[in-house]
Amino acid sequence: MLIGELSRRTGVNPHQLRYYEAQGLLVPDRGDNGYREYGDDAVLTVAQIRRLLDAGLSTQEIGYLQPCVTGAAPDLKPCPETLDLLRARIAGLDEQIGTLVQSRRTLREYLTATERRMAG
């Protein structure tokens, strides 16, 4: 199928599909006319990419995990690199959440103090 058909079947615009290709996540064949030609498996691959992006993974991380990805969910095989990457990503998110909680706390303190000054 051509890129337009893949776009229609996946709901992902052609520009994004070309980006996935540039990142090495999606590998089309090339027809004699030079057009990208995708197999039916590309629909599953795009679904996997989108779900992993929704989970907050970068395209670089997805490329690293792709050998361990199966199914539409997608399911991840318990490869050592999968577990290491996911643990590291979760640790990074936990750190970001901690920073955000502290920022929210500080902003609320500023807001409270400012509102008291207005009322007083």
Image: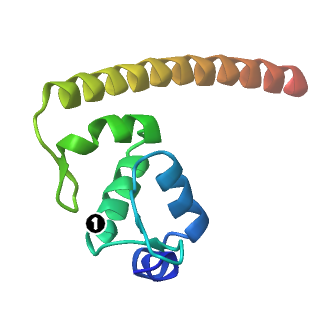
Near-viewer residue (54 or 2)? 2
* Residue beneath disc 1: 44
Q: Quadrant of residue 29?
A: bottom left
Which residue occupies 21% across, 26% down? 81
| Residue 58 in view of the camera | no
| Residue 119 in view of the camera | yes
Which residue occupies 35% across, 48% down? 52
Q: In the rendered view of the protein, which quadrant contains the N terminus?
A: bottom left
Which residue occupies 62% across, 20% down? 103
Q: Position of residue 77 (x, y in %)?
A: 11, 41
Q: Residues within 10 Å of mark 1 (few under 14, many from 20)?
A: some
Circle 1: element type? helix
Q: Position of residue 22 (x, y in %)?
A: 52, 49
Q: Position of residue 54 (x, y in %)?
A: 42, 51
Examine the rendered structure and indicate whether residue 65 appears above or below residue 36.
above
Examine the rendered structure and indicate whether residue 31 appears above or below residue 63.
below
Which residue occupies 28% across, 66% down? 44
Examine the rendered structure and indicate whether residue 40 appears above or below residue 19.
below
Left or right of 83 in this view: 95 = right
